[in-house]
Image: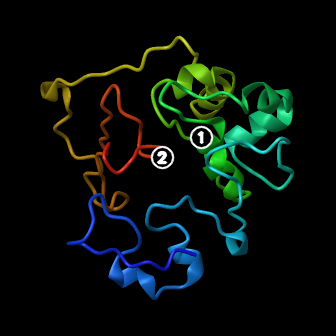
Amino acid sequence: ANTKAWEPAGSYPPTGLAATVVGLPEWIKAGCGDAEYICAEKGATFPGDVCPASLPDLSGHNNFATDVLKADPSLYGKLKDRKTEKGVSLAKCLKTGIDNKGHPNIKTVGLVAGDEDSYVVFKDLFDPVISARHGGYASDASHPTDMNPSNLLQEKIDPTGKYTLTTRCRTGRSVRGFRLPPACSFEER
């Protein structure tokens, strides 16, 4: 368990845990700091660096990635030892979907990209997952983008105010040449 407190003036990049986290339960501390989240109590035991030799039992899982792997278990053997040029493994991409079995009524993706090359190196898994999640989105499809603010509608989404409580616009960014948040280092952040 990670019990070392982070010393703000002592080290850079910081390692260990913030003082506010050191006294929390072990299952919370397990995912904090600079260590991979491994917590048997919560069933989070899939490694984030190297895939185990065999595909874990996925019979209780409900997400798009495990559905693809259940339909074609040979994909795991085909991809498990590959890494991207920046060192991202299939284990890093799959960890969230294996550790989090999902909910029977809420389908999650169960797969994350560690860098842009994850989509190429692990294409045989990413393509069917993306297609299933987006209702048939082809691997050669291009996402429509319209950055022209004059094309935004001016009318209210719900003029009566009876149905819409809030709305939000989410944005994200990634920078070519850097790993994505699931795999990036402190320095890359």
Tell me where residue 65 appears, x and y as whole percent: 69, 39
Tell me if 121 is positioned left or right of 73 in this view: left
The image quadrant where one finds the N terminus is bottom right
- The dot on residue 93 is 1
Residue 55 figure quarter: top right
Establish if 37 lies above or below 4.
above
- Using the image as rendered, state which of residue 61 and residue 144 is in the foreground: 61
Label 2, label 1: how many angstroms apart (C-alpha)?
8 Å
Q: Secondary structure at mark 2?
A: loop
Residue type, mark 1 in image: Cys
CB under 8 Å between discs 2 and 1: yes
| Residue of label 2 | 182
- Using the image as rendered, state which of residue 37 and residue 106 is in the foreground: 37
Q: Going by the picture, which residue comes out furthest to the top? A: 140
Badge 1 density bin: few <14, some 14–19, many ≥20, Cα 10 Å: many
Establish if 43 lies above or below 150.
below
Tell me where residue 130 appears, x and y as whole percent: 59, 29
